[in-house]
Amino acid sequence: MTTKTLTPLNYLISCRVRLSEEQRTTLRTAYNEIKQTATPATHPNVMPGSSIKVGTNYSINTQLGLADITISDLLNSRDSVSLGVLLNLQKALGVEVVTKKEILDASKSYVDYVWEQV
């Protein structure tokens, strides 16, 4: 195993993305398609007269490390999403709603704005 030596950064830049409704819909649709195709069909109760119901929950937990409830909250919330989480979600779902160029352009605009205010 190779060990990387991490050098402390002089400048810390973080990013959160406020998704549009169209972007959220794209992510929701991709998630629901994956969930639907990966969830096994339920079978009827084996014991006649039993009131026990068996359901199946699907999770892309292995790809994201997030439970279904967390993914659902991310996709339905109006809050901004951390860029790192969003990129992992895009990768797991196989869709792109935010590009590297968009983030770089927004970052440059922000830096230009801050410098103009001084």
Image (cartoon, helix red, strand yellow):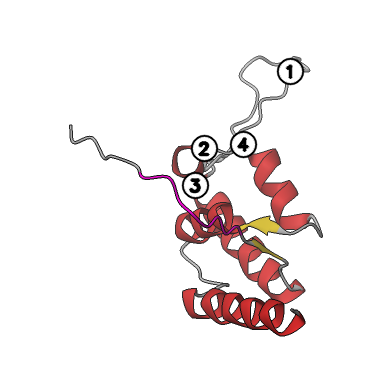
103 or 14: nearer the eye? 14
Question: Disc 2 vs disc 4: Cβ atoms closer than 8 Å?
Answer: no
The image's mark for residue 9 is none
Relative to residue 98, is residue 63 depicted above or below?
A: above
- Mark-to-mark CA distance, 2 and 1: 30 Å
Residue assigned mark 4 = 67
Instruction: Find the distance from the CA under tag 1 to the CA under tag 3.
Output: 23 Å
| Disc 4 + disc 3, Cβ < 8 Å | no
The residue where tag 2 is placed is: 65
Q: Main secondary structure of the magenta part?
A: loop
Residue 16 vs residue 32, the one in the foreground: 16
Does label 2 or label 1 sit earlier along the sequence? 1
**Amino acid identity at mark 4:** Ala
Task: Measure the alpha-carbon separation of dots 4 and 1.
Answer: 24 Å
**Quadrant assignment for the C terminus:** bottom right
Which percent across, then down, holds residue 93? 50, 59
Residue drawn at point x = 49 percent, y = 80 percent: 101
Of tags 2 and 1, the one toward the viewer is 2
**Magenta extent:** 7-14
Name the residue carrying label 3: 38
Q: Earlier in the sequence, mark 4 or mark 3?
A: 3
Q: Answer with mark 2 or mark 3, whichever residue precedes in sequence.
A: 3
Which of discs 2 and 3 lies nearer the camera? The answer is 2
Packing grade of label 3 (10 A; few <14, some 14-19, many >=20) is few
Of the two numbered discs 1 and 3 in the rendering, the one whose residue sits closer to the viewer: 3
Which is more N-terminal, label 3 or label 1?
A: 3
